[in-house]
Image: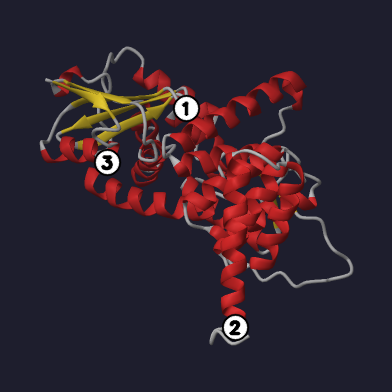
């Protein structure tokens, strides 16, 4: 039995719920043209047994090696034990059998891998899904763990909501945290929790959030939240990965492509995706006006008007005194009641853009704000 269709008609959350309730066994393939990515999830009787995504093709053995849970020698021993057994059991089973890993730790690492993929797929709002039903013995893997789909859905919904709150500072797992410079004139005492200290020791200016999570054997989302807290308190700064070794033209092309992706996502109503893509470009190139404008527009769509106004103010301080920035700062400021800034910004805009539909809208808004200010200054109508 094949189940397929666009995610706009049946969201990924509903797809997972359908496969869970109907206790399906088979392979779900999810593709996204916007992200140029593909995810594959294996189900057995409605529960998830394996998951992978093309943009992060890390195998279980790579996770175990990077996190220091096993050694290369352990891997070779497990491979030798598995050799000649055909489909049989997965490598993890042999790592447990040879004493390199406890079963509890194996299951924990496998669950982390599945969660990482499933939670990423749950943030996709566009794309196409296709489920191919198969008999249990036709699955390309022998299940070593069965994760409740219901628990994944509940936790995934919570994480998506929290991601939208931290996306302005932590737009993706590709962010590379670095220690903030010390301000000698304002000495401070750092008071961190054990989890924060653990993450802080992993920050070397090279590892991104995904790499830190792998080394620590922790959930990627938990690491993102901890780094967000460190960035908010000024202990750490977040930047996009350094792509200079790949050549300036390639990096510029990638950022231009990501901005275009943000524009398409915003036009399609995928606001969180647009915010994440634009924020990644802004982190790499803070002086890029288009990135800050797109971040501000996404924040406005999310009704985070104060943050949108702050973003546009930062654009002006960075020298991006373009008409569009002045116009949009005017509307953002008006939405939070900062009428003085709104009128000043619109005045700056109209000095350059004197005609056109946008100029007429600004004049109408400025007139309405002036009337409102006058009414507020004279509530009783006295002259």
Position of residue 329 relative to residue 205, above or below, is below
Position of residue 331 relative to residue 120, above or below, is below
Quarter holding residue 372 = bottom right
The residue beneath circle 3 is 13
Judged from this view, the residue extending furthest toward the front is 383
Could you tell me which secondary element the residue under label 3 belongs to? helix
Earlier in the chain: of badge 1 and badge 3, it is 3
Could you tell me which secondary element the residue under label 2 belongs to? loop
Foreground mark, 3 or 2? 2
Quarter that holds the C terminus: bottom right
Count of all numbered marks drawn on residues in the image: 3
x, y percentage for residue 314?
73, 53
The Cα atoms of the two marked residues, 3 and 2, are separated by 53 Å
Q: How is the image coloured?
A: secondary structure
Quarter holding residue 131 = top left
The residue beneath circle 2 is 378
Give the class, few, some or many, for how many residues have Cα within 10 Å of label 1's Cα (few <14, many ≥20).
some
Give the class, few, some or many, for how many residues have Cα within 10 Å of label 3's Cα (few <14, many ≥20).
many
x, y percentage for residue 195?
56, 60
Residue at the spot x=44%, y=37% of the render?
A: 100
Residue at the spot x=79%, y=48% of the render?
A: 318
Left or right side of 127 for 47:
left
Left or right side of 143 for 282:
right
Give the class, few, some or many, for how many residues have Cα within 10 Å of label 2's Cα (few <14, many ≥20).
few
The Cα atoms of the two marked residues, 1 and 3, are separated by 18 Å
Numbered mark located on residue 35 in the image: 1
x, y percentage for residue 309?
63, 57
Q: Is residue 307 visible?
A: yes
The front one of 16 and 4 is 4
Quarter that holds the N terminus: top left
Residue at the spot x=37%, y=31% of the render?
A: 126
- 2 and 1 marks in contact (CB < 8 Å): no
């Amino acid at each position: 039995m094949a189940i397929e269709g666009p995610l706009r008609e049946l969201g990924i959350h509903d797809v997972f719920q359908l496969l869970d309730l109907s206790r399906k066994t088979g392979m779900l393939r999810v593709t996204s043209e916007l992200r140029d990515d593909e995810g594959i999830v294996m189900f057995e009787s409605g529960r998830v047994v394996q998951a992978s995504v093309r943009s992060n093709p890390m195998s279980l053995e790579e996770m175990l090696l990077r996190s220091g849970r096993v050694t290369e020698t352990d891997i070779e021993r497990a491979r030798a034990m598995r050799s000649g057994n055909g489909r049989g059991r997965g490598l993890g089973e042999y790592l447990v059998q040879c004493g390199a890993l406890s079963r509890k730790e194996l299951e924990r690492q496998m669950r982390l891998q599945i969660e990482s993929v499933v939670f990423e797929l749950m943030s996709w709002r566009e794309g196409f899904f296709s489920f191919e039903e198969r008999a249990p013995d036709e699955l390309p893997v022998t299940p070593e763990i069965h994760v409740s789909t219901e628990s994944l859905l509940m936790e995934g919904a919570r994480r998506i909501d929290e991601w939208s709150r931290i996306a302005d500072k932590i737009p993706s797992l590709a962010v590379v945290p670095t220690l903030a410079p010390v301000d000698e004139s304002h000495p401070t005492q750092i008071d961190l929790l054990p989890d924060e200290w653990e993450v802080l020791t992993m920050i070397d200016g090279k590892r991104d959030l995904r790499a830190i999570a792998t080394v620590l054997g922790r959930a990627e989302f938990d690491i993102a939240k901890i780094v967000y807290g460190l960035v908010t308190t000024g202990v750490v700064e977040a930047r996009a990965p350094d792509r200079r070794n790949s050549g300036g033209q390639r990096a510029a092309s990638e950022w231009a492509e990501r901005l275009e992706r943000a524009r398409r996502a915003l036009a399609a109503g995928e606001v969180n995706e647009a915010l994440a893509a634009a924020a990644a470009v802004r982190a790499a190139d803070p002086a890029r006006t288009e990135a800050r404008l797109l971040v501000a527009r996404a924040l406005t769509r999310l009704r985070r008007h104060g943050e949108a106004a702050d973003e546009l103010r930062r654009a002006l301080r960075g020298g991006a005194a373009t008409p569009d920035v002045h116009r949009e700062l005017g509307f953002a400021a008006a939405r939070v009641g900062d009428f003085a800034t709104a009128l000043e910004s619109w005045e700056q805009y109209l000095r350059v853009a004197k005609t056109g539909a946008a100029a007429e809208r600004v004049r109408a808004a400025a007139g309405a704000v002036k009337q409102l200010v006058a009414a507020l200054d004279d509530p009783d109508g006295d002259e």
